Amino acid sequence: MQYHPPMGQRQPLDVMSVIAAMEGGAEIEEGTALRLLRSPHCTARALELLILQPVMRRSRSLVALVVRHPACPRAFALDALPTLGWRDLLGVAADYRTPPPVQRQAERKLADKLRHLALGERIALARQATRGLVLALLRETNPRCVDALLENPRFTEDDAVRLVAANPEPAAVLAVLRHPRWGALHRVVEAAMRSAAVPLGVALGVAATLSEAQLRRLVADEDVGPAVREGVERLIAERAQRRKAWH
């Protein structure tokens, strides 16, 4: 037996009648299930009955919407996450209604999938990534993906510093340094001077833009490589000589 909402009552859905129908053994269609999930009156009881419906086995999009619902049974949500694709996992992680433990688990599942995603998918994900996924993407080595991450509204100055400090790929670090916003920040520039991924010539070119105080901090920094330190010391000496010449 299949349940059909009464004609003329398309909005709003009578949630109690749907619950009664499911309790009575009726099957509901995907359209009715979607309206139920979007209703502000959808209860925990409605979800308990919905997840037992045959339509749930036929529609991954329905499963994703159930998982995102704040009244979704926790056990069902955690069991369902591994069956979702990356876009649905991102939707779960980004939905403010999703309970935080489910959001975090969705982020972990998606982070595990990163290495299996095509470049275009990683680029799309980087643009929309949640905070937990931004952190997972800081070691992304493809510069196009890094460019997308830098435009993510959740990306912060601390993230830029971490990426430059920890990313092993020179092209990824240079993408940050070329960025008009992040590449102009002093903390990011100083982190780049400590990074082994930055070519020496680039590091010394960046050093030429720093103040005297910043250069002296770098000389005293044990994390700065010897070749960069020597170049910075030469730059300090050259500036001192020029000042003498002017006077």
Image (cartoon, rainbow, N blue to C red):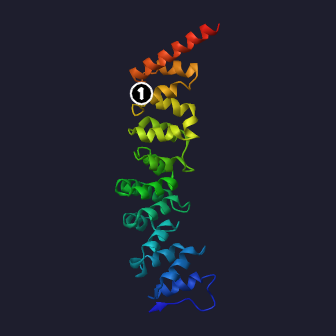
Query: Which secondary structure lies at badge 1?
Result: helix
Q: Nearer the viewer, residue 145 or 5?
A: 145
Q: Nearer the viewer, residue 136 or 195?
A: 195
Q: Residue placed at 44% from the left, 42% from the top?
A: 172
> In the rendered view, does 239 fall on the left or right side of 90?
right
Quarter of the image for residue 43 reads: bottom right
Quarter of the image for residue 59 reads: bottom left
Residue at the farthest front position: 245
Residue 46 is situated, as x and y percent measured from the top left of the image, at: 51, 77
Quadrant location of the N terminus in the rendered image: bottom left
Q: Is residue 105 visible?
A: no
Q: Residue placed at 43% from the left, 17% from the top?
A: 230
What residue is disc 1 on? 200
Residue 212 is situated, as x and y percent measured from the top left of the image, at: 57, 19
> In the rendered view, does 33 fall on the left or right side of 12?
left
> In the rendered view, does 245 fall on the left or right side of 52?
right
Q: Residue placed at 52% from the left, 34% from the top?
A: 188
Q: Nearer the viewer, residue 135 or 203?
A: 203
Q: Is residue 214 visible?
A: yes
Quarter of the image for residue 35 reads: bottom right
Amino acid type, mark 1:
Leu
Q: Residue placed at 51% from the left, 17% from the top?
A: 235
Residue 165 is situated, as x and y percent measured from the top left of the image, at: 44, 35
